[in-house]
Amino acid sequence: MNISKTILSGKHIVLTRALHQNAKFSNDLIALGAIPIIFPTIEIKTIADIALIDKAISNIRDYTFIIFTSANAAELFMMRYRFVIGNIILPNEIKTIAVGKSTAGVLASFGIENSKVPEAFMSKEIPAILGDITGNKILIPCSELAKEDLKLNLENKGAEVHSIAIYDNQIPESIDHSILDQPIDYLTFTSPSTVVGWIKIIADSKFILPDYTCIVAIGEITADAAKSVGLKVDVIAKEHTTEGMISAMIYYENAILATNNVQ
């Protein structure tokens, strides 16, 4: 199928991820002629009690692996690491795992270039790439809402896992519902947290999502979160990045165009 780079022209696309994370996604859409609608449903806040993460950082040499399952975890951990240790240099013997290109990109910005990245960009792929981890200590800085699946899977392989919250996803303090008073061709979700935030925000308004709106999820886990609250997910990105979401929307538009041409 010949994919046109202008097929998203004029399409109104809602971006629900945290405000500070929307720049590239938005600019990439604008470059394709789309109209991004910035409507963050979460804010990222460092948790108030950081004693546990500070203790882990102070004892960083105890760990064989540090696993970062999100760009937020990577950025906030490295900023805290710099505060506690005084630099951003991890011990050479520690191996880092990054879920997704954006997470690896954040680590690279702190000078950590050798992170392993699961090919499927999913945390469930991690145990398979670590090999024998019996007796290893593993640190997972994460959100307060993070699921325990990865921790349990690694513990089942014989590792000692410290899954420690470093940030929380909160509903934005200021919300302008009138932003949604325009056509919405696509509604995008980049994490289960953005889904939860959307549902909480919309519950406090009279907004009704148009029937024609296509809901796009960055991956299966986010899609499952959306389905669990009654949303119909139309598109799931094969590559779990915002670039993958754009490719999925382009493919979707082309599929509709091809169907209409046949008819």
Image: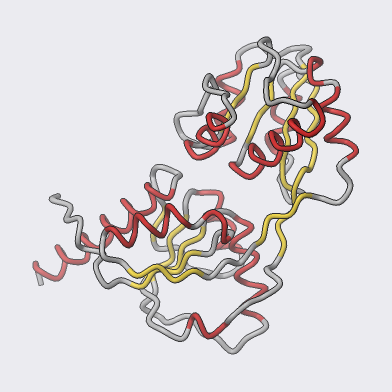
Q: Residue 53 location, x and y as percent?
A: 83, 35
Image coords of residue 262 (percent x, y): 9, 67
Position above or below: 159 against 29: above
Q: Position of residue 31 (x, y in %)?
A: 28, 58
Q: Quadrant of residue 254?
A: bottom left
Image position of 49 (left or right of 215): right
Residue at horizontal 57%, vertical 82%?
A: 177
Residue 236 sits above or below residue 91 on the image: below
**Residue at x-position 62% and y-position 86%:** 205
| Picture quadrant where residue 99 is located | top right
User: Closer to the camera, 161 or 32?
Assistant: 32
- The answer to which of 95 and 192 lies nearer the viewer is 95
Identify the image quadrant of the C terminus: bottom left
On screen, residue 206 above or below 23: below
Observer-nearest of 110 and 129 = 110
* Picture residue at 62% right of the left edge, 23% below the top: 96
- In-image side of 143 versus 107 (left or right): right
Residue most toward the bottom?
206
Q: How many labels were placed on the picture?
A: 0
Q: Is residue 242 above or below residue 202?
A: above
Q: Residue furthest front?
A: 86
| Residue found 78% across the figure and 12% down from its top | 135
- What kind of colouring is applied to the model shown? secondary structure
